[in-house]
Image: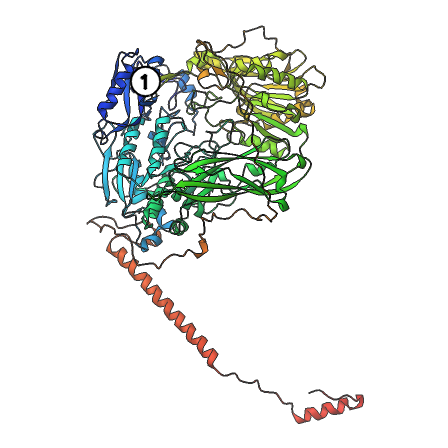
Amino acid sequence: LNTILKYGLEAQMPWRYLTITMFSPLSTEYIVAFNGYFTAKARSHFISSALKSSEALDWRIVPRKNPASDFPSDFEVVQIRQASHSSLLTLEDHPYIKRVTPQRKVFLPDPGATCNNDTRWTQKWQSWQSSRPLRRTSLSLAFGFWHATGRHSSRRLLRAIPRHVAQILQADVLWQMGYTGSGVKVAVFDTGLSEKHPHFKNVKERTNWTNEKTLDDGLGHGTFVAGVIASMRECQGFAPDSELHIFRVFTNNQVSYTSWFLDAFNYAILKKIDVLNLSIGGPDFMDHPFVDKVWELTANRVIMVSAIGNDGPLYGTLNNPADQMDVIGVGGIDFEDNIARFSSRGMTTWELPGGYGRVKPDIVTYGSGVRGSGMKEGCRSLSGTSVASPVVAGAVTLLVSTVLNRELVNPASMKQALIASARRLPGVNMFEQGHGKLDLIRAYQILNSYKPQASLSPSYIDLTECPYMWPYCSQPIYYGGMPTIVNVTILNGMGVTGRILDKPIWQPYLPQNGDHIDVAVSYSPVLWPWAGYLAVSISVAKKAASWEGIAQGHVMVTVASPAGNNVGGEMTSTVKLPVKVKIVPTPPRSKRVLWDQYHNLRYPPGYFPRDNLRMKNDPLDWNGDHIHTNFRDMYQHLRSMGYFVEVLGAPITCFDASQYGTFMMVDSEEEYFPEEITKLRRDIDKGLSLIVFSDWYNTSVMRKVKFYDENTRQWWMPDTGGANVPALNDLISVWGMAFSDGLYEGDFTMADHDMYYASGCSIAKFPEDGIVIAKTLKDQGLEVLKQETAVVEGVPILGMYQTPSEGGGRIALYGDSNCIDDSHRQKDCFWLLDALLQYTSYSMTPPSLIHSNSRVTPPTGTDRPLPERLEGNHLYRYSKVLEAHLGDPKPRPLPACPHLSWSKPQPLNETAPSNLWKHQKLLSIDMDKVVLPNVRNYRPQVRPLSPGESGAWDIPGGIMPGRYNQEVGQTIPMFAFLGAMVVLSFFVVQLTKSKNKPKRRKPRVKRPTYLQQQQQQQLAPTGKNPTV
């Protein structure tokens, strides 16, 4: 059914009419996941029995015609017309059904799609483009078709941006040893491959998982990726003799579905694939069927390599599945070893708000201007993390072929070898480079001396080491501060499942003041598949409240896994996590700022729109709103100004306000517990100050920007605006303050600083004795709703107020957070933040603001009603505060504050290591003693040139393919060896002659007789004897 839908804030071409081929909106597809693998007949029976008594009267199982259709499966795709919530619950209640989730689709439209009549709003907004796609896509950067309408939530091909990379990474050293990937099955999930492409000699199988009747690559992306891994000539890949298994999961129209991936993943498990490259990604780490299947793949010993994302240089932009612990996540660098600007940065945001993210990417390699196979023949240059990913996948395939005992190779052991051998890049932090640059030869050395064991990532915690350990090294710790959380990944190379024996042990070094810190450890109850977490919380002991210095210790962890090969018993491995921190005396209250993380919500799982409505290609707020992700620059600025910034990941009731000068609430989407409102009012009366950066909230605009999502086949309605203004108004109403539902934008000048207001709200109500600054702005809400332009004078945007209670704190309100948000900041307002902190922390009112010509009488809030919550919103589905209650959401019971169980120290009276940075020593492996074996004169076989073909091979030295290349490869080492032997023989002969030749005495020089007589006559009067 071809339908014409009006999109609001959809991803690729918003605010226009698009013709999209899809099912009717009433027809919704769901993925029904089962608890095991069942035949098609059994799956149909389970679904029929579950829906027999439900309201879903019109449903059908969607047929899937692909190579996996003849085998048992663990899921089914069901199309339900007018599906109700009760019918879905009925399905999930069936004992054999694990989960029911919407089917997701990626639709990447033709960039030449045309518009319909109503283009006024479109034309005004088309000039704004975003560089940060939000769907799971290809991570490469070269063509328009890599953009998609489903960019907010779907998977996408991660596009490639335009040297012979295998030889730069010294793959030819392993080729000369006879290792070329032989016997290793490598799967490429992409856009397919042509049958008779001249670059590939061992394509074992090509399968099509799409609804098109072709196996060929109509786009070129899949061919390029396969070429980087296994091309045998011209732009040569790493493992030309590997078995290529091509999985075509994207159509020529750039469309894919989650169910296609699930079927293809099942088939990969059936085929016992060794290495799988996935140059796709997206922000949705809550796409449960996809994430669960990735876990299942790696549990079946499939080494998955995936691109980390092209959403850099912004932090908090990691893509899934590369951000998973069991997947090798790859970032990109250029050939000068600089982190590529496009490469996504950490940390992971799964763990927010209560925890802290993990280190990703795992490793970086060349991803900028890399040469690979063209769609039909020849070579091309592309860039992107989807290029870096097959570089690592090719290297991994080559490495697997070098290991004689393949039982030692698994997703954990391979990642251990890669990160232990990686070369750290200078001046780059761990959230940009992970463990460093891929070093193929060192990885070979480690892997071929590997013993099954556990290891840690990162392998040590050094809060004094900058810049690598940023952000930990950017701020010392002190007594009374929020605990510093380091999220360490445990890699278990001993088995797919494991556990931590007893409890981790904290051992402080007494000579290095280790008893000045307290450590609490939480960890995964089960390590599966191949990995788990170790969360280390570090705090300063009370006795060090006024002490300054370095404290050290280490955490000991013992991991156990069942012994393999039916031996019985357990294998154990003990690892040590060194800890080193810098402690300073507790700063004064005025210098301490507390950041509210608990009340920030983001995608996934819900539709939380961007704070700047002009960011139409980047419509969802998904970067975590953390001081170390999209507010990183603001954090760095505050540190440079001498402030100490801490993060609150719990309700407002869970911190001691007497320790802090200012509480910052920025871009808050969450509701508030009644107890939180009471607590904050009491805290401000006692001297705590508050700064609020709000954003737009307008229910009419929220309805306008709803869109029909091709991924879930559902209408998406935002549950808040840029911020949850009604909830903020509830919080600050006790002081007679409120924000409006006005929506404004525009350039202006404040205190001689150029400013830009991006989709902000205004102040609707403020105390009469407060300070209010107003500016002339454009009414953006009117432009969105009616495509009309209007300029509004005197829009109140900034307010400052001293509370009347004795010793009370101060409150500052500003209607827009975009000027301190890295995601879409055009002009920063850090100067304004400095001025507000001077006001809140030191009661110093900025003269440039108090005497400003823009100062107006505070608004009373009587001219228009205050904003109300959107009727029928589903915020309760994602909220930590609300829960459903007879159709009217109510606050949940206030949760208990987090309580850490501090480890009992076992002090050591010994000296701690001075330098914690060293390559991980995997058990007894000494990198200096692991040498390369004798090199045999061997190169991978290459196909001879056909008549009329070009022989140019773009590699250093201009070596040509074919027989000439083989002869040169065999002859040059021989002549070099003979020449070296001749030179060595010459020097040995010369050295022998010099040793055997007898020594000659130096002759004594005699003076002439007449000179001796003359000297005796001159010295005679003195009575001295002459000395000859």
In the image: residue 205, left or right of residue 135:
left
The residue tagged with tag 1: helix, strand or loop?
A: helix
Q: Residues within 10 Å of mark 1 (few under 14, many from 20)?
A: many
Percent of width and height locating residue 777: 54, 16
Q: Where the N terminus falls, by quadrant?
A: top left
Q: Quadrant of residue 248?
A: top left
Percent of width and height locating residue 135: 38, 27
Q: Who is closer to the viewer here, 820 or 888? A: 888
Q: Seen from this angle, which residue lies furthest left? A: 947
The answer to whether one can see residue 253 in this image is yes
The answer to whether one can see residue 340 in this image is no
Query: Which residue in the structure is indicated by mark 1?
Result: 91
Q: Where the C terminus falls, by quadrant?
A: bottom right
Q: Amino acid at mark 1?
A: Leu
Q: Who is closer to the viewer here, 275 or 381? A: 275
Which residue shows up at 47% across the image and 28% down it? 623
Up the image or down, 438 lies above or below 600; here it is: below
Up the image or down, 144 lies above or below 101; here it is: below
Percent of width and height locating residue 382: 36, 39
Q: Who is closer to the viewer here, 409 or 665? A: 409
Up the image or down, 246 lies above or below 600; here it is: below
Q: Who is closer to the viewer here, 396 or 762? A: 396
In the image: residue 906, left or right of residue 259:
right
Up the image or down, 144 lies above or below 428; here it is: above
Which residue shows up at 46% across the image and 32% down it? 348
